[in-house]
Every structure is written in C-alpha cells, then in structure tokens.
Image (tube, rainbow, N blue to C red):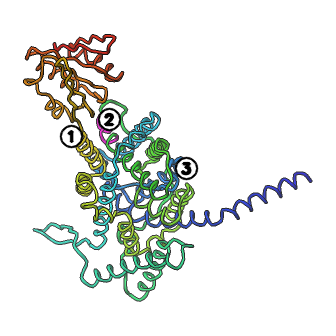
Amino acid sequence: MESKQKENSGKFRSIKFFGEHKSVIKSEVLSGLTVALALIPESIAFAFVAGVSPILSLQTAVVIGLVAATFTGRPGMISSSTAAIAVVVASLVATHGLEYLFATVILMGILQLIIGFLKLGKYARIIPYPVMLGFLNGLSIVIFLAQLDQFKINRVTEVNGVSVTESVWMSSGDLLLMIGFVLFTMAIIHIVPKFTKAVPSSLIAIIVMTIIAVVLGNSGIHLRNVQDFAGMEIAGGLPGFHIPQVPLNFETLSIIFPYALIGGLVGLTEAVLTLQVLDEMTNTRGRTNKEIIAQGLANTVNGFLGGMGGDAMIGQSIINIKSGGRHRMSGLVAASALMIFIMFGSAFINAIPLAGLVGVMFMVVVSTFKWESLRYKGKVPAQDILVIIVVSLITIFADLASAVIAGVVVSALIFAWEKGKVIYANEEESATGEKTYKINGTVFFGSVLNFKELFNVEEDPDTVVLDLKYAKVTDYSAVEAISSITKRYEDAGKTFRIVRLSEDCKRLFHNANAFTSVVIDEGEDEVIEYPYV
C-alpha cells in the first residue's frame, strides 16, 4: 500500500513538473527543431570548405552539439561544426588527410580544456564593447556573403579539351524565383510573431516553404534543395569510436600543433564572444570558464569519433534565443533532432528548399547587424568608431581571431594615447627657493613624453622636488623617464628629490634597481634620494 502511494506520488510530481513547465519545454523543443533544420545546409557548406564529406560535418554537428549543450556554461548556446574551424583545418586535410585532422581536433580540445581548467577565461573581459560591435557587424556581412553562393550554379565548359567547372549566377528566371521565395520566407518570419509566438516563426517559414517546394515539384517547377546543394542524398548513422592512425612522434606533433593551437584559440574566441552576445540579449551572465571546458571536452570527444571540430555558432545561437530557447534542453534537442534527421529523415531533409533556409539566414543577418552603430557618428568617440570599422573589415577579409586581436590591440593603443594626455603638474615654490612639481595622473609608457615636457631644467632653481602623492608610476618606461629627468638635473648641477611615493611605486623603484642600477635611500621624512647611475 505504501509503495503504491509512493508510486502515485512520483507520478503526481512528474505531472505537476511538466504542467508547470509545459510552455518552457514547448519553446525549448520548437526552437531546438528550428536550429536543427537551419544547421543542415551550413554544416554541408562547412564540409566543402574543410574538404571533408558532408556526412562527416553533420555528424560533427551532432557530437559537438550534444557534448557542449550538456556541459555548457551558457544555456541556450548552440555549438556545431563551423566555418572558422573549417578554414583553419582545410590546408591540413589537403596535405595530410583525415587522420591528421582527427588528431588535430583531439589536441585542440585538450588545449581548450587546459585553458578552461586554468581559468584563463577571465581575460575575455578585456574585449571592449566596440570590438564586439565590429565583430557582430563583420560576422553578419560574412553570413550574408556566404549565402550568395546559393544563388549560383556550377557550369562545366570545355577549354582546350579540358573540362572546367565554374560557378555562375542562375539564369534570370531561376534567380528571380529564388529571390522571390527568399523574400517570402523573410516576410513570414517577420509577420508571424505579430500574430503568435507559440511556434517559432523560422520553423513555420521552413515548413511552409517545404510544402510549397513539394507542390511546385509535382507541378514540374523544381526549386533547389539541400540534396542539389550537397550533390548527394544526405543520410547516415552515428559515428563510431576511432583512434587517429598517425605516428606518435615529435614530427606528428610539429604538424598538428600549429593547427590545433590556432583552431583552439579561434574556437574559444568565437565561443566567448557568442557568450557575451547572448548575455546581453538575455540580460543574464554565463560562466566563461565552464563554457571553455565544455568546448574543449566537445572537441576532444569529437576527435575520437572522427569529427572535424567545431565551436559555438553565433548565428544559430541567436536563432535559438529569439525562438525561445533559454536552457540547455534546446541545444540537446537541436543536436538530437539533427541526428534523427540524418538517420531517418533524409527524405524530408532533401526536400527542404534552399530558398527557405537562405531566408532564415538573411533574417539572422538583419538581427545580428548592429544597425544603431551606423548612427554613432558624432555621438561616440571617433576612436570607438575606428575600432568598429577595423574589426568589421578584418572579420570580413581575414578571420574572427585576427579581428578580435587587432581590435583589442587598437583599443589598447588608443586608450594609452588618450590616457597619456591626462597628466599635468602643479608647480609650487617655497620661501627658500625650492621648487616642487606635484604630478597628477599616471606615468606610464603612453604618458612619458608628456611627463618629460612638464619640467624646465634650465630655468628651475638649484633644488627641485618631485611630489608623486597624486601620481601613479606603473611601468619600467615610467622609471626610465624619471631616471632621464634626474640625469638632466644632475648634469645641470642641481639637486633632484622624490617624495611621497605610494607603496606600489616604492616597490616598483626597488624592483627596477636590478635593471637601472638606481640606489634608493628612503628617509623618515619619505624623501627619496634618486641619483642617476
């Protein structure tokens, strides 16, 4: 009797749980399905970039998606095979083959795990907001340009008896038809939320477009679909455990390590920026180091299952969030649905028209691009606009990692330049003829030139005091600058003293002794004799 009551109580709790969370579960499942459908053509495209089979890229998307969603530090984030990783490994696949690719993916995952366990994700906070804006704008343009290939077909021509394949635009009739259905898809996605948000508008658009494609196909009008794009029927099973068949020696390590390091950093850069974007969209905060560990674990597992590696996908993550996905369930559903599609739903996948999927991606472009940044002129500092433009251009013409690094460097240099201007001295002269320079600001590599110009050695009296109570001496460039000023006063036969240093400044001067041969004598009155040696 008691066991019966416990059983009924357990059933009641289960019913209550699903009743209370019914709307959440519905949103998670539907957004996951939408993402799974949108992942198909992109995964196939990434396979062509990397030089691997489409089914390998799709299986990679499944494995990366499942593992990353399970251990993610940012619920709602979608991970899969990506263009960034495909570009990195393309030359490796071409020169050394798939086995070296699998070994590289494993090493890439291990490097990411090390970065995560060492908690180095905190350094992602140094990425300025203008860099993120430039990244988003550049990425949206990259996504837009990548979709233009869907409006082209391959044409084979004979040149001197040799068959040459070239990519050309569709005929005018087919091109107009394709554009029309792309715009129709975008219209559905835009209009449906005004009537209902119960079902993701992207999913509705894809279903409607698939029905239209089937009806038109029966009428003799064929729309290009996924099968046409891949050149084969997309079908397959689950990947199996596989140890890369490569020699375990230093030569192998020297081949795969550069690719693993670059791929790992590119992947983590994209993951961290995606995390920040989703944080902003949802007004929540993800766990950076946990996400890095999740990405590393996903790639390590993927390498042992014969995959091409991947990372977070900002476009699909935005689709997921905008479709209502807020929990890890949506990521698990997306990967699981993609796996089921591959195994059992190849007929449905092959029927999806590319026009519908291109329309979905164009709406991602519209939502990803920060349109307000076009109105920043005259409203934000010119240097921030410069950073946005630089990062956007490098993202378009190079890669994400280079763009972010360049953006951080440019931002740092601009900050150093502007910070270097904010330094000045209040000059005071005592009744005994002693002159005091009270420095205000930070003395560092960016301000040393302005700092040196504050002093008038020739016209100053015989005794000069440098008061650093309201100043901050931060680096060796500052120590060298003070050494230079001291030497100038010494050469002029004048006495130069330093007073009222903070403890950090005193420590910096003491540590610099080994490099500058400076002798510091601290008296009770906090006057430091600072002879130049």
Q: Residue at x 47, y 79 (%)?
A: 208
Is 6 left, or right, of 237 in this rendering? right
Q: Which secondary structure type mostly characterizes the magenta part of the structure?
A: helix
Pinpoint residue 99: horizontal percent, then vertical percent: 37, 44
In the image, residue 370 above or below residue 483: below
State the residue position of label 3.
Answer: 70
Cα gap from disc 1 to disc 3, whole angstroms: 49 Å
Which one is closest to the eye, mark 1 or mark 3?
1
Of the image marks 2 and 1, the number of the one nearer the N terminus: 2
Q: Quadrant of residue 511?
A: top left
Which one is closest to the eye, mark 3 or mark 2?
3
Give the quarter of the figure containing the C terminus.
top left
Is 322 left, or right, of 94 in this rendering? right
Pinpoint residue 120: horizontal percent, then vertical percent: 41, 37
Pinpoint residue 213: horizontal percent, then vertical percent: 42, 81
In the image, residue 151 above or below residue 503: below
The extreme right residue here reads 1
Cα gap from disc 3 to disc 2, whole angstroms: 32 Å
State the residue position of label 1.
Answer: 421
Q: Residue at x 36, y 68 (%)?
A: 366
Nearer to the camera, 520 or 193: 520
State the residue position of label 2.
Answer: 252
Pinpoint residue 135: horizontal percent, then vertical percent: 32, 55
Cα gap from disc 2 to disc 1, whole angstroms: 51 Å
Callout 2 crowding tier (Cα within 10 Å): few <14, some 14–19, many ≥20: some
Range of magenta residues: 252-260
Nearer to the camera, 194 or 464: 464
Of the image marks 3 and 2, the number of the one nearer the N terminus: 3
The extreme bottom residue here reads 219
Asked if the magenta segment contains residue 254, the reply would be: yes
Q: Could you tell me if residue 330 is visible in this image?
A: yes
